[in-house]
Image (tube, rainbow, N blue to C red):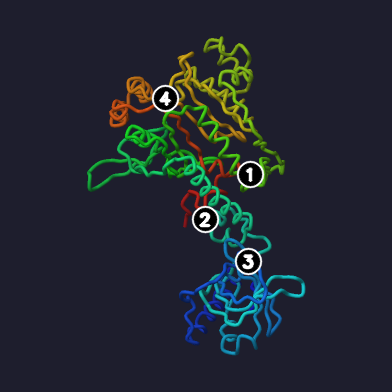
Amino acid sequence: MSEENPAANNEDLGELLKVRREKLNSLREMGIDPFGKKFEITDSPAALRENFEEEKQVRIAGRITALRDMGKSNFLDISDINGRIQIFVNQKQIGEENWTAYEQLDIGDWIGVEGETFTTKVGEPSVKANVVTVLSKSLRPMPDKFHGVVDPQIKYRQRYLDLIANERSRVVFLQRCRMVAEIRRYLGDMGFLEVETPMLQDVPGGAAAQPFETRHNALGMDMSLRIAPELYLKRLLVGGFDKVFELNRSFRNEGISRRHNPEFTMLEAYWAYADFEQMADMVEDLVCTLAEKFCGGLKIEHKNAEDEVTKTIDLSRPWRRAPYKDLVAEAAGADWWNLNEASRRARCEELGVEISSEMEDYEISQQVFEKLVEEKSIDPIFVTHVSKELVPLAKQNTSDDSIVDVYELIINGAEISPGYSELNDPDVQRERLEDQAGEEIQKIDEDFLLALEYGMPPAGGIGIGIDRLMMMLTGAESIRDVVLFPQLKRREG
């Protein structure tokens, strides 16, 4: 058995592949299945290392990730996604037959080990192998352990290699799994019930976005992948659920960027008899709970890979709350809301905010907000009471009919979560949806409006972009670094 250093050129790689195939055949000639069978384990590598006891009989399994060959005695590491443990293999201890099979193994192969725990002279927790069992032969050499996987095409297209070679990636995705489980636990403890709503929808609603379209052959009808689960979750409020949530996959046929993937994970939750301010309280507590439990505290560091500038997001409570109009006025001038549309356009030119001639007046103000407020906000801020044209599914404010009772949570220059006092007046909801649909009136979900006519209780609702939340909490600068299999352009050739 020898440690390989995969060469860069195809000729050397071809030789390495040939050698591995020869070892595969050797195992078969010995009557050993190179792709193994069930192997009962007593511990995982990480759990054994964390709760280590000497002179304990164990059965563990993992991938060979390191090897120190000393002739008739070898030290090797076996690992899984959670961690590693050192194995000591001695020819005399495991016997000639087992040693002959062991010599056909390489870094990357999966093995099972039966043996006894001990600590080396340098204090390393280890297992002295009595039996080594082949579980799966790797036919290709592993990525260079020192350099890891740095090519983004390999990193994202072959995520399994990234997970094998890069500890940072393993940490991020383990954090994500555990955080999502904690979100479920948190909401469950608050009395929320998790439900599932349709991904295939006749009329995609709940957001203004371009859907992916498909065809249901048996029903003979065009359908769309959902852009949000909102309208179905609100049907459940009508039906009597008072606290309901869905951790869902949604789809939007739009651009791909550092913060956008066409397939994404979103949390939506609805709480009967609550309002947007209670939802803001809950989201603030949830995010801080995640940070304290998984990130070591409320200070999150982000390092920009391009300029290596490090910034710190401070999640210390209480988070700032400020009205949308006040924030726009702070950025664009105290007189902004007293200007006419022409003057606002001129002000945008002075401020360096790009706008188009097709933009409506409220869209001009929103562009100012996005460029001068949202993109510059690092620490958390709940932006409240936005223009009603921007949020057609939220309840109108009773004191100012130009705004709605909502928040938008901004952290690190991105919207992490919107929250509403939900609109439950079916007549006002119809007007809002018709204004949003314009001439495409057929895109209004009439079944949802029918449900509202049976009575939906006043409620608070939230959405949280889980991928963006994970970016913020783990310090990732791209959504591709927190999505296991991001969408990529098809590889040519």
Q: Which mark is residue 84?
A: 3
Q: Which residue is mark 2?
A: 157
Q: Which mark is residue 392?
A: 4
Looking at the image, is mark 4 or mark 3 earlier in the sequence? Answer: 3
Which SS class for mark 2? helix
Q: Residues within 10 Å of mark 1 (few under 14, many from 20)?
A: few
Looking at the image, is mark 1 or mark 2 earlier in the sequence? Answer: 2
Residue 431 position in % (x across, y down) = 35, 20
Q: Residues within 10 Å of mark 4 (few under 14, many from 20)?
A: many
Looking at the image, is mark 1 or mark 4 earlier in the sequence? Answer: 1
Q: Amino acid at mark 3?
A: Arg
Position of 51 compared to 466: left or right?
Answer: right
The mark lying in front, picked from 4 and 3, is 3
The mark lying in front, picked from 3 and 2, is 3
Picture quarter containing residue 336?
top right
Picture quarter containing residue 70?
bottom right
Cα separation between marks 3 and 2: 25 Å
Cα separation between marks 4 and 3: 52 Å
Q: Amino acid at mark 2?
A: Arg
Q: Nearer the viewer, residue 91 or 155?
A: 91
Quarter of the image for the N terminus: give it: bottom right
Which SS class for mark 3? strand
Cα separation between marks 1 and 2: 32 Å
Q: Are marks 1 and 2 in contact (CB under 8 Å)?
A: no
Q: Which residue is mark 1?
A: 292
The mark lying in front, picked from 1 and 4, is 1
Q: Is residue 442 above or below residue 341?
A: below
Looking at the image, is mark 3 or mark 2 earlier in the sequence? Answer: 3
Cα separation between marks 1 and 4: 35 Å
